[in-house]
Image: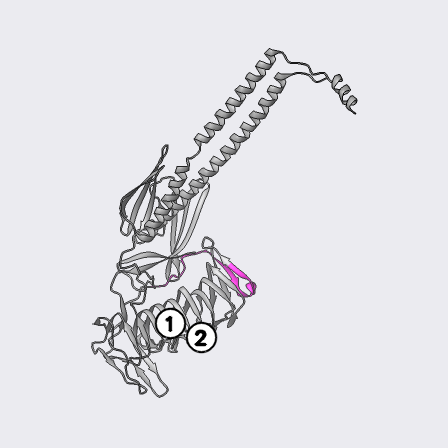
Amino acid sequence: MLKASSLLYAIFVCLIVSLLCGSLLIIFNYQYRLKQQYFLEEELVNASTSNFLQVIHKNDELGVEGEVQFKDERFKTSYTISKWGFYNLVKTKTFLKKDTLYKVALIGSTSKKEKIALYLSDLDKPLNIGGTTKIKGDVKISKYGVKPAYINNQNFTGTKLIHGAIGVSGKRLPVLQQFEDVTGNQKIIEVLLEELAGKSLYNSFYKPTIVVYVDGEYIIENISLSGNIILQSKDSIYIKNTTALKDILIKAPSVVFDENFKGVVQVFAKKNVSLKKGVQLQYPSSIYIAHDSEEKIEVVLEEKSKLAGGIVLTGDSYQSSLNRMVTINKGASVMGDVYCYGKTQLKGKVIGSVYTDRFYLKTASSIYENYIVGGEINRLGLPNNFIGLPLFSNENNSYELIKEL
Amino acid sequence: MKTTVMSLLRNCKLQASSLIESVMAIAIISICISMATLIYVKLLQSDYEIAYYKAKQKIALFHLETIEEQLFEDEVYNFESYKITKQVKEYSLGVNQVDFELQTKTKKETQHFLVKVISSEETY
């Protein structure tokens, strides 16, 4: 017999409805918290971006570490500024309770001062220009000025010798700022390259720098290194195009990049750096040699090789400046600054500025001093917001973001 | 077959509930359902409005436009269900502070941003 118990059924229905209501409340609550978390994360990202902007725009005033905040007091950003090669490395950490946002970026300085295409030391010799040479931008050269040259049965073919204002240079190149400390990270981990053979290694800039030592003369191949890594050798190294290098520093007396190598590296060498045919050192890459020697010190960019960033070749003595040379061969190009306290053989293209003591030209029959034939310097072709190497100090510099790492 | 079903129905007896019992049950169920409806409506009301989401999305868009097109002028944007007011002031050399105030029927909120000023000679 089926019992008629309306009250029991009513309570049962109530139970079902209350269960439904309860689950609705829980789901809503969970979703509400999720939305709040999402909005908070959005605010954290905005605060991190704003605070990061504050850090790079106050670079001169700020110390190597500190804390900034903007408007919302909930979000504080702690930062540290150190060196990574030529550039400054900014690490920020924005946090709110358990949420933390890290940001690492390379920043460089842009000079608001005069932007010249060529600075040639006044060694009492005129600058001779021949063939298809183009110089676009203001120049500072010897008081003897600029003359068209006739070499290898070839006249100067352009319409104007210099497409810009001509000023008089000094006896010496502008003084470079010191680049002693290439990495501010005191903590390092040492690794031998043999241990990494065939492997891929990435190291965060929040961790201690990994120094990968290369023992003796070495051919580096089939390896991938990126991030907070220094590749160091006491001898010359040859980097094959099967190697992938990104954002790392290379410290070795002599470095040769194999044909068609591509990567982003800052090279700190002592003797020679050679970029074989088709090498592409992408932005922000650079080559730096500061050394006095009786032997030849040379940076060579072979045909079709490209470098975006800059080249610095310097030293203390005038005598050894006679042994220093940058050669940019036909078809090779540099985007950025070339600073050479020595000779520059320009047959290729520089989109940026050239600072050199003298030009050098070797043909099949003879050697010429202060001659450019078939080369190009185009300061006007360089984007105004391009961040080159921070060559000179005590200028009215402002800092800009180069890339986030 | 037909006779078997009929005999089964005859044997099954359904006891009737009293009137009071039925009224109480109806009362309990109606209270329960009204409470559930109340909870549901309250939940819907306490959530963010759709206009709020739209306004937030629009602010993100205006912020990007400000950065890319360097639009540093005060503006008021009126939309059907919300209003956005943009205010620009200089924060430091080369950096502007851009505030966006969003206003919906129930919410009013201000978001602050710092935007880098690219000088005209830097624009390539």
Mark with earlier residue (1, 2): 2
Q: Which amino acid does the dot numbered 2 rest on?
A: Lys
Instruction: Please determine if labels 1 and 2 lie on a single subunit.
Output: yes
In this rendering, the answer to whether A366 lies above or below A186 is: below
Residue A200 lies in the magenta stretch: yes
Q: Are marks 1 and 2 in contact (CB under 8 Å)?
A: no
**Residue A375 visible in rendering:** yes
Residue at (47, 36) in percent of width and height: A33
Quick check: A68 left or right of A227?
left
Mark 1 Cα-neighbour bin, 10 Å: few <14, some 14–19, many ≥20? many
Residue at (65, 16) in percent of width and height: A5
Residue A117 in which image quadrant: bottom left
Say which quadrant the C terminus of chain A sits in: bottom left
Quick check: B25 left or right of A244?
right
- Residues at marks 1 and 2, CA–CA distance in whole angstroms: 12 Å
**Residue with the mark numbered 1:** A333
Label 2: element kind: loop
Say which quadrant the N terminus of chain A sits in: top right
Q: Estimate the x, y position of residue A280 in percent, counting from the top left.
A: 43, 69
**Residue with the mark numbered 2:** A277
- Residue positioned most to the front: B2
**Residue A216 visible in rendering:** no
Residue B108 lies in the magenta stretch: no
Circle count: 2
Q: Estimate the x, y position of residue A191 in percent, counting from the top left.
A: 52, 61
Q: Chain of mark 2?
A: A
Q: Estimate the x, y position of residue B99 in percent, counting from the top left.
A: 31, 43
Give residue A282's mark.
none
Q: Which amino acid does the dot numbered 1 rest on?
A: Ser
Stretch of the chain drawn in magenta: A178-201
Label 1: element kind: strand
